[in-house]
Amino acid sequence: MRNFLRAIFPAMLFLAFTSLPALAQPKMATVDLKKLFDNYYKTKLATAAIQERADELEKDDNGMLDDLKKHNDQYQTLLASASDQAVSQDERDKRKQEADDMYKQLQDQQGAIQQFERQAQVTISDQRQRMRDDILDEIKKAVADKAKASGDTLVVDTAAQSANGTPIIVFTDATNDVTDDVLRQLNSTAPPDLPETTTPTPIFSSTNTLPYNDMPGQPGPAAQPTMP
């Protein structure tokens, strides 16, 4: 009896494994997340809103730079008048002191502009990140709903790349690619008048500076280094 059980047990084990339900075998689908993200109408709306905000900040920055240039011109005029030999020494000293005070104001003004530009970069970066996260959450939910409805147990992103920039999925025959179906679902409620958008360019990609002249031989502002 023991020998009989020993002989039949492997056969019973084989039958048990081969008779597992089909659920044990994953049904896989593929999706191109980049295509979904780039072509989702909410991405276009969010991109337009971000660019509008960036344009507003750029306009404010340009206004502050115009004021800085105007004040710098006034400073240069005052500094030149401090060397006017047609006026008394006391008057020249007074003008040089006024130039010193104006120079410090210019430094403060430029520092405020640079701080504004740094904060503007953070503002736009944070807005972009929130937009990206919110839209990706919506896309992932739409993909999950599609997968559940189709009985898919695994969905792989064909646009994914490794850390060194190579594609993670080297080949797929796209037999069960759900990208277009999901995209149609996502854009089913898109408004008819979507804005034209382009890839936003970073605002203030380099710090705006105003050239300040060195003034060798002059007291006061002349002793200050040229502002960067």
Image (tube, helix red, strand yellow):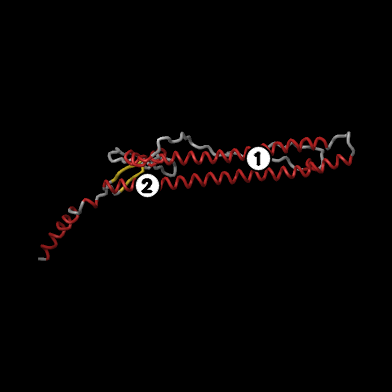
Residue at (84, 36) in percent of width and height: 83
The residue nearer to you, when weighing 31 against 13, is 31
Residue 9 image point, x, y percent: 15, 60
Q: Is residue 79 above or below residue 119?
A: above
Amino acid tagged 2: Lys
Q: Determine the residue located farthest toward the front in the rendered image.
A: 192
Mark drawn on residue 64: 1
Residue 102 image point, x, y percent: 76, 42
Camera sees residue 92: yes
Residue 106 image point, x, y percent: 72, 42
Q: Determine the residue located farthest toward the right in the rendered image.
A: 88
Please state the total of marks drawn on the protein image: 2
Q: In which quarter of the image is the C terminus?
A: top right
Amino acid tagged 1: Met
At label 1, counting other C-alpha atoms closer than 10 Å, the crowd grade (few under 14, some 14-19, many 20 or more) is some
Identify residue for label 2: 140
Horizontal side, residue 211 vs residue 28: left or right: right
Residue at (44, 38) in percent of width and height: 44
Mark 2 secondary-structure assignment: helix
The residue nearer to you, when weighing 14 against 213, is 213
